[in-house]
Image (cartoon, grey):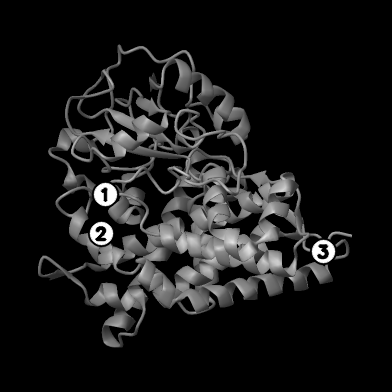
Amino acid sequence: MSTSTWFEDEDTASNASGNPDRPHDAINLSTKEFWWTTMDEREKTFAVLRTERPITWQPPFEDGLIDEPEDYGYWAITTHRHLVEVTRRPEDFLSAPSILMENLPVQVIDAAQSIIAMDAPRHPPLRRLMASAFTPRQMRTIEDQINANAAMVVDNLIQKAKESPDGWVDFVAECAAPLPMHNINDMMGIPDGQRQEAAEWMMKATSWGDPEYAGPTKDDAITMLFDAVVYMHDLAGGLIEERRANPGPDLFSSLCAAEVDGEQLTDHEIGSFFVLLTIAGNDTTRQSLAHGMRALTTHPEQRAWLLEDLAGRMSTAAEEMVRWATPIMTFRRTASRDCELDGIRITKGDKVVLFYSSANRDELAIERPHELDLSRHPNPHVAFGGGGIHHCLGNQLARFQIRALFTELLTRCPGIEAGEVELTPGNFFHVVKRMPCRPFPS
């Protein structure tokens, strides 16, 4: 079932965007060079745009995987208030056909984005169905398992550090990546062994811009993306068949048994949601954990404050870590009709890209946004979205995991330190590929 189904007509469903005669802004947010730098470097540019011209017309992303001859660019939304407004106007700004600023093969989008790239009328009932697994009450029922997984990954981190000649070990590989991997797969009911291979494929699926994973050519990257989603749908297909015959207490079984408007979900719909959950559920938490650990190292006064009352202060600290990391940097919407945004005329079919990493540093919305403040409250960040019908389903799960991991880690390794991060280049996830750490500095 194609995400283009949710458009008002086929013209809107295409990737055509904008007027070829509309001039692009002098500041270009679409170059690879811009996205291959650090968040701090990009923030210098965002700060200028937020102050001088917060809504600008930008060229298409440079050297994307798929060339769209009629893609003339997108509107860049850099302020907190404009981002929130767009997310709360779903009738004007649609999520279909894709939430990525970069053009990818439509088959990959259809197989991987599920409800995140849907609109009414299909989106509301599917979201209600899937949201039932992510309520605060449901999270509390699996809190013990989340805490157990946090203890397990810290055990492994400490053991690997003891075996290391210099005491250094990769925090991403031993903590940040396996914790959400186990928690998501526990919820879905994915057997151990299969979950590790699935995580490896999903790492590839989110690294299409990284030559280490994707290879040197666009064809290599496209092939890798297809292989990743085919693997995940094949894995889902086998599990769907098994759960329909022998249902259990897991989310896969619930999805197999569920009905929307009197009809069961198709295998493709379940598989697409599985891909979305595996990617989003893993990567958002993983990046928050990695960037959060690095922030505790570079801001020792904040770590000291947190350690004074770890149990009492961890919730506000986790919220600030998510803001600081901003694990998803951009999301795209598409105009369903001619409309206005703060006086700017936007035409039907125009792409509109939300820059969360800019909005989370917006001085008019967040006091002292360039300072890490683990005591920040309230914290009006938009790392889980700006509200509205597409607000992150897994936000409570992410919060539970961050609190669990850092509570376990800082209780057992209060002096842990992290080295420099190695980032995966890209404009979507704020990916930390590797980051060395020493649980017990000498």
From the image, tell me which residue sits under label 2.
Answer: 127
Q: Is residue 27 above or below residue 197?
A: above
- Of badges 2 and 1, the one in the foreground is 1
Q: Is residue 67 visible?
A: no
Q: Nearer the viewer, residue 57 or 417?
A: 417
| Residue holding disc 3 | 440
Q: Are marks 2 and 1 in contact (CB under 8 Å)?
A: yes
Q: Nearer the viewer, mark 2 or mark 3?
A: 3
Q: Position of residue 64 (x, y in %)?
A: 45, 34
Name the amino acid type tagged 2. Arg
Q: Earlier in the sequence, mark 2 or mark 3?
A: 2
Residue 54 image point, x, y percent: 41, 22
Give the residue drawn at x 30%, y 34%. 85
* Quadrant for the N terminus in the image: bottom left
Q: Which residue is mark 1?
A: 389
The amino acid on which the numbered mark 3 sits, given as a three-letter code, is: Phe
Pick whichever, 388 or 153, lies toward us.
Answer: 388
Which comes before the other along the chain, label 2 or label 1?
2
Q: Residue at x 21, y 54 (%)?
A: 123
Out of 229 and 274, give the one closest to the viewer.
274
SS under mark 3: loop
Instruction: Measure the alpha-carbon separation of dots 2 and 3.
Output: 44 Å
Give SS at disc 1.
loop
The residue that appears at 57% across and 67% down in the rendered structure is 404
Q: Amino acid at mark 1?
A: Ile
